[in-house]
Image: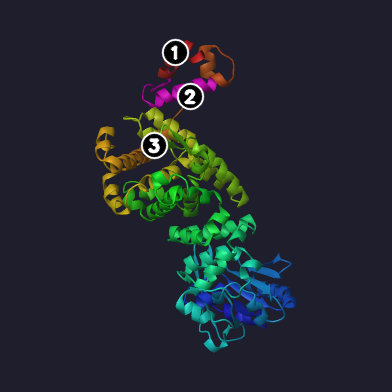
Amino acid sequence: MSNLDKIIKESVPDGYYVGGALRDALMRRYSGDIDLAMPREKVKPCALKLASKLKATAFEMDKEFGVWRVSAKNGLQIDLCAFVGQEIKTDLKRRDFTVNALAYPVNSPIKISLKKEGKKIFIKLSSLKKDGIIDLNGGISDIKNKVVRANGPKIFQEDPLRLLRAFRTACELNFKIEDKTFSLIKKYSALAFKPAGERIQEELRRIFLAPNTAAVLRKMDESGVLCSLIPELAKQKSCALCYYGDGGVFTHTMKVVERIEFLLNNLKRAFPKYHTKLKAYARDISLYKMAALLHDIAKPATAKEINGRLRFFHHEERGSEMAEKLLKKLKFSSDNQKLICKMIYYHLRPSNLASNEIVTDKGIYKFFKELGQAGIPMLLLCWADYTSYVNPRQIPTLMKKSVLPVMTMEEAKKKENVGKTLRHMQMLNFLFGKYFNEEKRFTAPVRLIDGRDIMKTLKIAPGPKVGEIMEQVILEQVEGKIKTREDALRFILENKSKLLG
């Protein structure tokens, strides 16, 4: 499709290139799609003509705002939208940030390059005549200076989603939010939860995909936007100051986000034997960062002082419930809700395992059975949680030692807080080893007998008891006490009264 610029000129002669593609062109970057603006009455006919020439599909996306999308089989996507007002200059005045408030006539000189990554097409505009770019508020200068600046004083009132988009734009482009714009964000931060949940989710996902999410969340917190979105985080700031220091639980939460970010970027260093297999579990890093942000959301609600010690009994269960309500509001898919909530609900389980000197195969089987698909993701969250209690400078050394056999509890005590963290890290490596080296044994043991065998041997009717007995057989099998069908039948006969009792 080397002649795309010519096809667009022929199909949309009165249109303008606008939005991110034009901004990215000035930064010599590829962009995800092309946005074209034009008079409202020309949107539909131009979309249909463009689709015909590209042998693509055209459909209306938003009747109220006059938006059509042309989608080609190769992944190319072009959006055509109506001017806000009667002309392009009026339209540009209503856009969000100066770096996005630029326009370039379709009939002016331009070159379009395409590249494909997976199923997605990326485009780059080049060879533009700089004096042909319409720039009303210094957007070109702001791009040069790497600044996100509000395109007007009412942009956040007109669309509160822009409160989030300011941070997303800044982190994706590695720009800084201009001071006056940041003050405007503070002023209108309470509006942050007004947009539709799916729109908020999309902005958060893109922020979570950035390499510096923790830093961005801190700026969002400084502006008031973060706690407007998730009010429970505000309560963390005054909770457990005696334990976590300034900022209380919130300080801990931010550290966990930092650590999960570090871990996902350093899987090979953290788990040299298993990093290749772990990559398959860590594809959607946005879900891990959301889980990290919410994992202790219920600590303020469950905090109680017992015998002079601050405790948070059942905060993981309560936190799972609170997270589910938020994720539903943000329109996360049912599968993603279940994954994040399960990670939160069980995030203390590895600590409970580590509280035993010896972890049995039976315990490991129960662990992975109960967690299912959330087992491995939850262990990665736990790594971030444990390492949040040590100085970041200590982590590289601890990672090297974490591949060693799990130290005894006495050895861990001698090393105080660092020892406890290291033992937990070694326990995670141990669990990964059990899972990846003996996965079928711990997730899908071969059934040596079935329900009919149990009913026939013990002369019992169908019912829940059959399943309970089968589970006991599997637990014995996991521990190596039962190896054959004959072993299994002998076990249920010898333990008949106990199993039926």
Q: Position of residue 343 (x, y in %)?
A: 48, 42
Local packing at callout 3 (Cα closer than 10 Å; few below 14, some 14-19, many 20+) is some
Specify the farthest residue to the front: 308
Q: Which residue is mark 1?
A: 495
Q: Which mark is residue 116?
A: none
Indicate the amino acid at tag 1.
Asn
Side of 408 where 71 appears, left or right: right
Q: Quadrant of residue 77?
A: bottom right
The Cα–Cα distance between marks 2 and 3, rounded to whole angstroms, is: 25 Å
Depth-wise, is mark 2 or mark 3 nearer the camera? 3
Q: Position of residue 322 (x, y in %)?
A: 56, 43
- Quadrant in the picture for the N terminus: bottom right
Q: Position of residue 277 (x, y in %)?
A: 39, 47
SS at circle 2:
helix
The Cα–Cα distance between marks 2 and 1, rounded to whole angstroms, is: 14 Å
SS at circle 1:
loop
Q: Which residue is mark 3?
A: 351
Q: Which residues are magenta?
A: 466-485
Q: Position of residue 88 (x, y in %)?
A: 66, 81
Write the residue at 35% across / 54% down. 266
Local packing at callout 2 (Cα closer than 10 Å; few below 14, some 14-19, many 20+) is few
Local packing at callout 1 (Cα closer than 10 Å; few below 14, some 14-19, many 20+) is few
Q: Which mark is residue 471?
A: 2
| Residues marked 2 and 3 touching at CB (< 8 Å) | no
Depth-wise, is mark 3 or mark 1 nearer the camera? 3
